[in-house]
Amino acid sequence: MDTDAVFRALADPSRRSLLDSLFARNGQTLLELCEGLTMSRQAVSKHLGLLEAANLVTAVRRGREKLHYLNPVPIAQIADRWIGKFERARVEDLVAFKTQLESPEGDTE
Amino acid sequence: MDTDAVFRALADPSRRSLLDSLFARNGQTLLELCEGLTMSRQAVSKHLGLLEAANLVTAVRRGREKLHYLNPVPIAQIADRWIGKFERARVEDLVAFKTQLESPEGDTE
DNA sequence: TTGACAGGCAACCAAATGGTTGCCTAAAGT
DNA sequence: ACTTTAGGCAACCATTTGGTTGCCTGTCAA
């Protein structure tokens, strides 16, 4: 499990919004993921490649198209690393509270 | 809350090991954090600057030294973003299981 | 079988990043 | 007062990174 690949993959805003897109609708093709984006298909393809290498996205070929699925496991491992076992419940409640406070406004990223 | 700063701060292995160091012992000074590291003090200082800007580390000046503390909240927010409310329990159990399998060996990063 | 469509590969470019060195400020210790 | 110690600031350098364009492979439909 290559930890570094996960963090570097998450470092880019375009890749994060790709994950958001898959979180909203799982199993999209490359061209579907390109929709609404300004950059070229090849750019998106590269990003997906990094996300796959980091195991954040799993891809399945079906005929000539490729379906992409979000894999939440590496993300859960991040939280596991720096949040103490006993701290966890407290911090998660705090986060839920904060996001509820902020959500009425918007704040996408 | 600048999300991008958080992810970019986490993207670097040196910065992640700084967080590890603070997770092991909270409230360290710059020079303490430099111990055992190969890079220069200024490099570490820069890294800490990014971690502070991302709000992953909170620093308090005491006299001429500066104490650094790990803040787990932004990390919890990451998990919140891509792990569905109902998926969470399942994924966390899976991660706990996987890390238990891997832990006997070592695998530091 | 010919054309259109989904995607991959490689070369290339501008910008950001991690690191260095050198010098500066401020708080303690003697 | 002088020196040491903790840390900050700025300029600079090599490498990486995100993006582009151009071309190639494979699958489906007419």
Image (tube, coloured by chain):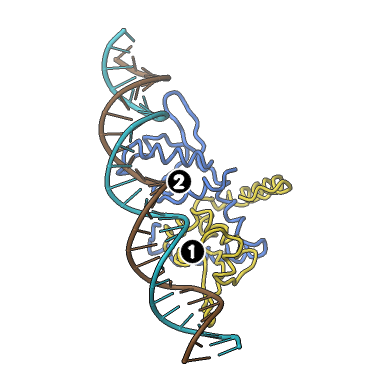
Chain colours: A blue, B yellow, C cyan, D brown
* Residue A8 visible from this viewpoint: yes
Q: Which chain is indicated by disc 2?
A: A
Label 1 marks which chain's residue? Answer: B
Q: Position of residue B3 (x, y in %)?
A: 43, 59
Q: Amino acid at mark 1?
A: Leu
Check if mark 1's residue and mark 2's residue have beta carbons within 8 Å.
no
Quick one: D17 or A76, which is closer to the camera? D17
The amino acid beneath tag 2 is Leu
- Dot 2 alpha-carbon crowd within 10 angstroms: few under 14, some 14 to 19, many 20 or more: many
Q: Is residue B97 above or below residue D23?
A: below
> How many residues crowd mark 1 within 10 Å: few (<14), some (14–19), many (20+)?
many
| Residue hosting label 2 | A19
Q: Which residue is mark 1?
A: B51
Q: Which mark is residue B100?
A: none
Residue for point 43% across, 49% down: A16
Q: Are marks 1 and 2 on the same chain?
A: no
Residue A53, percent across and down?
51, 39
Q: Tell me which residue sits at (43%, 60%) in the image.
A: B5
Q: x, y (%) of residue D24?
A: 35, 21
Picture quadrant where residue B79 is located: bottom right
Indicate left or right for C28 with A100 as reference: right
Classify B26 as above or below A15.
Answer: below
User: Which of the 4 image quadrants contains residue B22?
Assistant: bottom right
Q: Position of residue C21 (x, y in %)?
A: 43, 62
Residue drawn at the location 54% of the way across and 41% of the way down: A55
Q: What's the distance in space between the residues labelled 1 and 2, CA to CA?
A: 24 Å
